[in-house]
Amino acid sequence: MTGPVTVAALDVGGTSIKASILDAHGAVLHRESVVTGVRDGRDAVTENVLALARRLVDGFGCAAAGIALPGVVDEAAGTAVRSAALDWRDVPVRRWAEDELDVPVAIGHGVRAGALAEARLGAGRGCPSFLFVSVGTGIAGASVLDGRAEQGDGGGAGGIGHLVVRPGGPECACGGRGCLEGVASASAVARRYRAAGGAAPGGQVSAQEVQWRARAGDALAEAVWRDAVAALADGLAAAATVLDPHCVIVGGGLSRAGAALFAPLRRAFAHRLAFRSAPRLVEAGLGDRAGSLGAGLLALELLGHSLEALALEPATAAVVGGLG
Amino acid sequence: MTGPVTVAALDVGGTSIKASILDAHGAVLHRESVVTGVRDGRDAVTENVLALARRLVDGFGCAAAGIALPGVVDEAAGTAVRSAALDWRDVPVRRWAEDELDVPVAIGHGVRAGALAEARLGAGRGCPSFLFVSVGTGIAGASVLDGRAEQGDGGGAGGIGHLVVRPGGPECACGGRGCLEGVASASAVARRYRAAGGAAPGGQVSAQEVQWRARAGDALAEAVWRDAVAALADGLAAAATVLDPHCVIVGGGLSRAGAALFAPLRRAFAHRLAFRSAPRLVEAGLGDRAGSLGAGLLALELLGHSLEALALEPATAAVVGGLG
């Protein structure tokens, strides 16, 4: 292990594992994605994660690794307490990974790791506090104060996916009705459009396709998209009312809609918070790389590197942001 | 100034100023209330606050004073930025009070000071994090982490009065519709009952009276009370979803309804958070004295007394709790 320090960073999602190699300045030297392999069962997922981590650590001579996970994560214990997406329950990820890799391993939660990366390298730089919300297949959030994603009592601080925004609305997997995730996530947008007859029976359609059709004048697509944006504004306004953050950062797949999302979202958000000055609402800076960058930052920290110093290197941040 | 250290503590509300004298252990040596005098204008309010503070500081030889204020408070600058209840705007309370009293003065926000007192001396002892909500004329909240009430970006962290719980519902003074405060505060309960024809034209009725009538079988009172409890459960569940606190502490005038409030509220709260384990929901321990006790703690801290030590003295806390 000669040469400059590097760390391996993995962000494990329900569909893919996004991996990066970072140097000590937070710059990305390499990145790749592999399928998570959820269909092959939970053991296959574990094997895929460990095999990828070993290949990266060996190949790049990494001094540490960071792994970001979905669901309920005990970061201190290094375990995946419960992850519906991976069908994992009480998996001692850190212990298994350290046995496999022979380097120290940091375990983080996907959206909190993403929030940490946005704080240090992305849209949250210079922002004393923010709510980071990732709108994709699901809707997850994290509350960041002084560059740190808060934990909450059960790891749920900043979670807004199950805020009830449409009382009596669509059923949610959580057992409730009208949850934000059931109305405004990318999968909800696609599902609601299909359910309303917007696609041929059995036909697949993505949230992005719905948004394109809305722009092209498809009235049904417009109604579904408009309602999703309104619900998202409601949820963000409720969370901002309670957390009082300096700004709100929205990322995840749906945020790639750009102005089609942010223009109406900003209007509705400011309107709902008219009783006070609404926090600035901005697009995430690191795209779908935020989680793996955050996992890398956790690994750097494990090696004793200060993230505060990192945040002061805008040139490095720009490089990483460009890759994000 | 011989003898043990004492501090004067004032909690300025729209109706009364509640004052206490605390010793260095947080025990209450004296307490009193005077009318705020809002009807006589903002200058009269200022005079009343300063006169009471001087009488207490002089009479008890206090080494410092703490003043808790409603509205938007800049605690660091020691100013009342904006208080509708007192008709105050940009009042340099600390400077005026220190000029008047010749002792150091700490300025706090009413509900955050109350939350601090609950954390050290009340229902929040031993609780790593909690949401404190005061339901009275209005609804205010504070989020406490490690014994400290969080500020948020604009002093609004934990504020749940303007969470929208009834989209399209009653108009709120904030300009929105369906805010929690407009449905579930003590004044909203009384107002909605009157508006629905529950009291003789021009007749006065308090929230407590509405709750008594509900218990006695008045169907209209029952409906108003039930809806207020349901809305409160909705608001607390939304805030708990976002903040993920260890417990939720409810105080203020309405909490004096006891089991008539807490039994249905706990059921509804747990039901709404069925997708995760709901935090414990408990009644505040210090009653309407929380704000002034908190102001006293801020004053003690100003003198260099550690509040951590205070929290370790259950005997003292019990005495104070009994007085609360």
Image: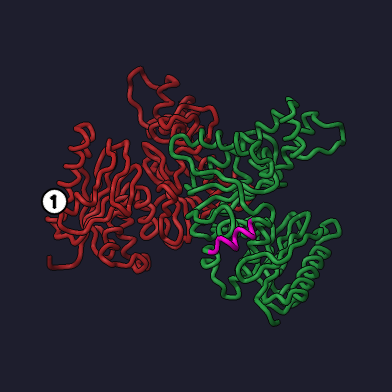
Chain colours: A green, B red
Magenta stretch in the rendered image = A313-321
Q: Does the magenta run of residues contain A113?
A: no
Quarter of the image containing the C terminus of chain A? bottom right
Residue B315 point in image, percent of width and height? 33, 65
- Front one among A240 and A254: A254
Q: Quadrant of residue A55?
A: bottom right
Q: Residue at x 28, y 42 (%)?
A: B90
Q: Quadrant of residue A315?
A: bottom right
Q: Quadrant of residue A286?
A: bottom right
Q: Residue at x 67, y 39 (%)?
A: A184
Considering only vertical position in the picture, is B195 above or below A35?
Answer: above
The residue to which callout 1 is attached is B55
Residue A217 point in image, percent of width and height? 73, 26
Q: Residue furthest top?
A: B201
Q: Residue at x 59, y 55 (%)?
A: A122
Q: How many C-alpha atoms fall within 10 Å of the one at disc 1: few (<14), some, or many (≥20)?
A: few
Quarter of the image containing the N terminus of chain A? bottom right
Regarding residue A175, the answer to whether it shows in the image is no
